[in-house]
Amino acid sequence: MSSKLSGSLIKRFSRLCILFAAALILPGMNVCSADYDPRRDSSVYFRVKDEGMRIALSFDDGPLKGKTDKILDVLDKHGVKATFFMVGSQAEYCPETAVRVVSEGHEIGNHTQNHKSLAALSPDELDREISEAETAIFEACGYIPSLFRPPEGVCTEKISNAAKYRGYSIVMWSVDTLDWQGRSACDIAENVISNVAPGSVILMHDGIFARSHTAEALDIMIPKLKAMGYTFVTVGELISESAYE
């Protein structure tokens, strides 16, 4: 058995242990308070306090053949690792692209199975959106994600509880590039450069079906951010080695 497969199996077994423990307290997980604020939830990350100059690039809604590949090409060109929050149905549709993401050393997060608006779902439907995406990603590329990002950036207490029940840390962002709006590469890059700070999580998209300039923006901004002293890490590395903010 390869070390990569063995590591995936160990990670999957650990997740099952988490689920078993969580099942013992599941009835309490659906009790939500009216004043819930995700920014006060220690399991929800927007940015972190970082004494260095580390930042993390994250990409939502993929993988998408062609779009994700162009982004991977640019990341490889500049020696940057990033985090891809994948939609399970997209991983099923583009498994070869998901495999490329993993093989090139990037991180994968869970972005649900069908990218639905989660707030309107029942607890069972919400759990299926998360668990089915996890299965789809694992079957596509052998990776078990430990990070979760809710679609549309909507994080209610119900959604937070459902993700934590499955053993996830929830990751939002502190810099929104708005690349999905079709903005020019220069506008996207300038938006990031003007708003970034140490510990930032930057939101971009590789799953945009319409014309986008995300890859071109990366090619502009990565050298500039490096020249400013920033270093790029995955989201998992950023939140595991820095203080929560």
Image (cartoon, helix red, strand yellow):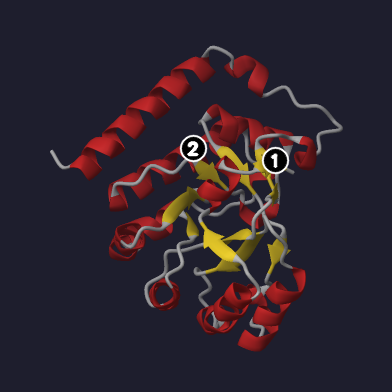
Corner quadrant of residue 123: top right
Vertical arrangement, residue 239 with respect to residue 182, above or below: above
For label 1, the crowd category at 10 Å Cα-Cα, with few meaning under 14, some 14 to 19 and many 20 or more, is: some
**Residue at 73% of width from left, 35% of height from top?**
41
Vertical arrangement, residue 60 with respect to residue 180, above or below: above
Left or right: residue 187 compared with residue 4: right
Amino acid beneath label 2: Arg
Disc number lying in front (2 or 1): 1
Could you give the CA–CA distance between mark 2 and mark 1, rounded to whole angstroms? 29 Å
* Residue 113 percent across, percent down from the top left: 47, 49
Whether residues under marks 2 and 1 lie with C-beta atoms below 8 angstroms apart, the answer is no
Corner quadrant of residue 178: bottom right
**Residue receiving disc 2:** 128
* Residue 210 percent across, percent down from the top left: 54, 80
Amino acid beneath label 1: Tyr
* Residue 50 percent across, percent down from the top left: 67, 50
Vertical arrangement, residue 163 with respect to residue 48, above or below: above
